[in-house]
Image (cartoon, grey):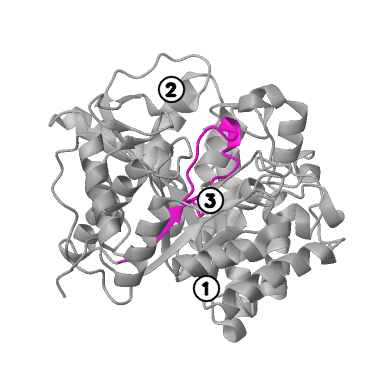
Amino acid sequence: MKVTIYLFCTAVLFLGQSRSEPSNKKFPENFRFGVATAAYQVEGGWADDGKGENIWDHYTHHQPDHIANNATGDVACDSYHKYMEDVEMLKNLGVNYYRFSLSWSRILPTGYTNQINEAGVTYYKNLISALKENGIEPFVTLYHWDLPQPLQEIGGWPNPLLEDNFAEYARTAFTLFGDDVKNWMTFNEPQQTCLFGYGLGATAPGASASGIGEYKCAYTIVKAHAKAYHIYDEEFRPTQNGRVSIVVDASWAEPGSDSDEDKEAAERLLQFSYGFYAHPIYHPDGNFPQVMIDRIADRSEKEGFPTSRLPELSTEEIEYIRGTFDFLCLNSYTTNMVKWTNDYAIGAPGYYADLSVSTYQDPSWNNSASGWLKVVPWGMRKLLNWVDQTYNHPEIVITENGFSDDGRLDDLTRINYYAEYLTSILEAVLEDGVNVTGYTAWSLMDNFQWNFGYLEKFGIYQVDFEDPDRTRTIKSSGEYYKSVIANKCLVDTCEE
């Protein structure tokens, strides 16, 4: 542990940070630590043993120039063949749980329940069994961005038919794995799926329909989540006794000044990002955020649309969706500054025109390898308090948080990031009374980082992607995180 703290102090000096020392308070006894990965990013085996094609397989194969160095997830970390090594890594870290996702196409190659791929089922059963044998709780995400390609061929998430397709997939997963899985997440970061996949066209499947596509996508996803939740609640909870939620991501939005206009702009950004997907599920009133309903309806009318581009949730749908969670899941990495601006001119519809705010990041904030990810730990505390107050004090599990670099083993900047963010989280728990019960580091190991290929590394284990065996090596941050988990403490000696 002494070596670990030396590494942290070196990191502070290396970064030139002026922040005070990490908290010397202990995490509560019920606080749990985990790590996360996602199927497409680590599994590989893209066409092995009957797996079907998904949208990221299709996207990387047919539009390779959209990915750094034409990379794919065809092999990735090869976890499909090396999952027992992954379990050993998890056991070495001492994590309480492992958050991973199922590949829909590995279980249902066509996307439909007409064909179940037994080899895929066996893979996940073996992984889950190995985790439980080693005292590691599986936290399972049903959908982490990898829609079966046959379902994209009928329009993907903007098609409301996918509500039932997802519900049947969820029922299949609950049936197959529910006796051993007690924590389920339906979707990971639907904002990324909808905004970037169906609005801006920046990620798979690359559909560009901003101002329309992302709203139709969100409408389907929140209903699909609710249907899966009700299926679990009515058919499986009485015997399996598990929990279900959805993972929504947000960066903290800090007003650029004390002006009422900047404060309103920052709140609007939070509602357009986190609130859009969280409000119908977590908020006592349900429905999409009122600011979105009003602004999109107004701009749609001025643009000549007969109705709002934002689909309307009926009274029955609001009631059906509201409260479909057992705990709240939050992914967050960074902070943005927000300033009020005049509304964008009426013209072509678009999400950012509907939002109409100005965002930026302070140039003094420390950088990661990702242009969007700056080190702003105080933003995490503010975001946790906002979520707590906005959604009526739920139990919160932080399901992703992490830092990117070039993959070096002596990753002092990542140690610093974890220590500072965990300090802010602990302050939110102990000083503000926010009910955070879990923290999940992204990621267990370096992996395929979507459009950035293998350039950005988030892992606490290094993966040698030049080695056919995909050798894994623990980094300094892995050793640091291991000590944090073992002692529930960020420094050598904590106050009890």
Q: Circle 2: is it few (<14), some (14-19), or many (20+) Cα within 10 Å?
A: some
Q: Which amino acid, mark 1?
A: Glu
Secondary structure of residue under mark 1: strand
Where residue 457 sits: x, y (%)? 50, 40
Where residue 436 sits: x, y (%)? 31, 64
Left or right: where 35 falls relative to 232: left
In the rendered view, would you say 443 is above or below 269? below
In front here: 5 or 86? 5
Q: Could you give the CA–CA distance between mark 3 and mark 1, rounded to whole angstroms?
A: 18 Å
Where residue 253 sits: x, y (%)? 29, 37
Magenta range is 436-461
What residue did someone put label 1 on? 137
Q: Which amino acid, mark 2?
A: Ala
Secondary structure of residue under mark 2: helix
In front here: 37 or 323? 37
In the rendered view, would you say 86 is above or below 204? below
- Name the residue located 50 percent from the left edge and 35 percent from the top edge: 456
Queried whether the magenta region covers residue 194, the answer comes back as: no
Q: Could you give the CA–CA distance between mark 2 and mark 3, rounded to whole angstroms?
A: 37 Å
Q: Earlier in the sequence, mark 2 or mark 1?
A: 1
Q: Could you give the CA–CA distance between mark 2 and mark 1, rounded to whole angstroms?
A: 43 Å
What residue did someone put label 2 on? 353
Residue depth check, mark 3 versus mark 1: number of the one nearer the observer = 3
Tag of residue 445: 3
Q: Earlier in the sequence, mark 2 or mark 3?
A: 2
Left or right: where 56 falls relative to 329: right
Where residue 260 sits: x, y (%)? 16, 32
Queried whether the magenta region covers residue 445, the answer comes back as: yes
- Name the residue located 39 percent from the left edge and 46 percent from the top edge: 275
